[in-house]
Amino acid sequence: MLLQCYTGLDAFRRGRGSRELFTTLERQLLIAEELCRLGYHPDEIADIQEAHAAMMHIDAAEKEDGVWVMGDADYAWVCVAFELFGRQLYVAPLDSIAKAEARMVGGLLNGKQRLATAEVST
C-alpha cells in the first residue's frame, strides 16, 4: 500500500501524475483518515486533512492548466500524511486495516448515492 503512495507521489512531483494516480493517492489518504478514527494516531488526523486539501489544490490546478503536478507545499503535506500512514500500517493489525478500507469504500458509495439522489430530485 505504502509503495503505491510513494510511487504516485514521485510521479506527481515529476509532473507525470494522472487521474488514476490522483484517485489512488486520495483513496490511501481516506484509509489513513479512517485508521485515525479507529484509534491509530487519532491526534494526527489534521495532517491527513491537510493532505486532502493539498490534493484538491492539485486537482484544481490540473483543471486550470491541464497538468498533474504537485507544488512544494502540497508535496510536503502529502509526504507528512504518508509518513503517518506508514506508522499506522506498522501498528495496525490487518483486520483494522481491512475495516478502515471497508469504511472508506462505504463512505465513497454513500457519497455517490447521495449525489445521485440529489441529481434526480433537481
Image: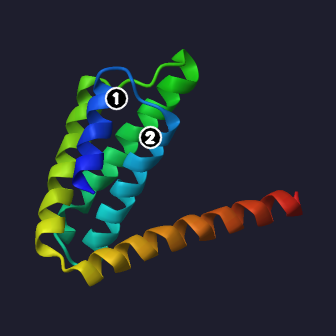
Q: Is residue 57 above or below residue 32?
A: above
Residue 13 position in % (x across, y down): 29, 25
The residue wearing badge 1 is 12
Q: Against 101, is 96 above or below?
A: below
Q: Where does the C terminus fall, quadrant-wise?
A: bottom right
Q: Which mark is residue 22?
A: 2
Q: Residue at x 28, y 54 (%)?
A: 48
Q: Nearer the viewer, residue 55 or 96?
A: 96
Which quarter of the figure has residue 112?
bottom right
Mark 2–mark 1 Cα distance, whole angstroms, equals: 9 Å
Neighbour tally class for label 1: few under 14, some 14-19, many 20 plus, Cα within 10 Å: many
Question: What residue lies at 34% left-to-right and 70% top-to-bottom?
Answer: 34
Identify which amino acid the numbered label 1 is placed on.
Answer: Phe
Q: Residue at x 24, y 25 (%)?
A: 72
As helix, strand or loop, the secondary structure at mark 2 comes to helix
User: Which numbered disc, 2 or 1, marks the residue that appears first in the sequence?
Assistant: 1
Horizontal side, residue 51 vs residue 27: left or right: left
> Looking at the image, which is closer to me, 20 or 35?
20
Image quadrant containing the N terminus: bottom left
Mark 1 secondary-structure assignment: helix
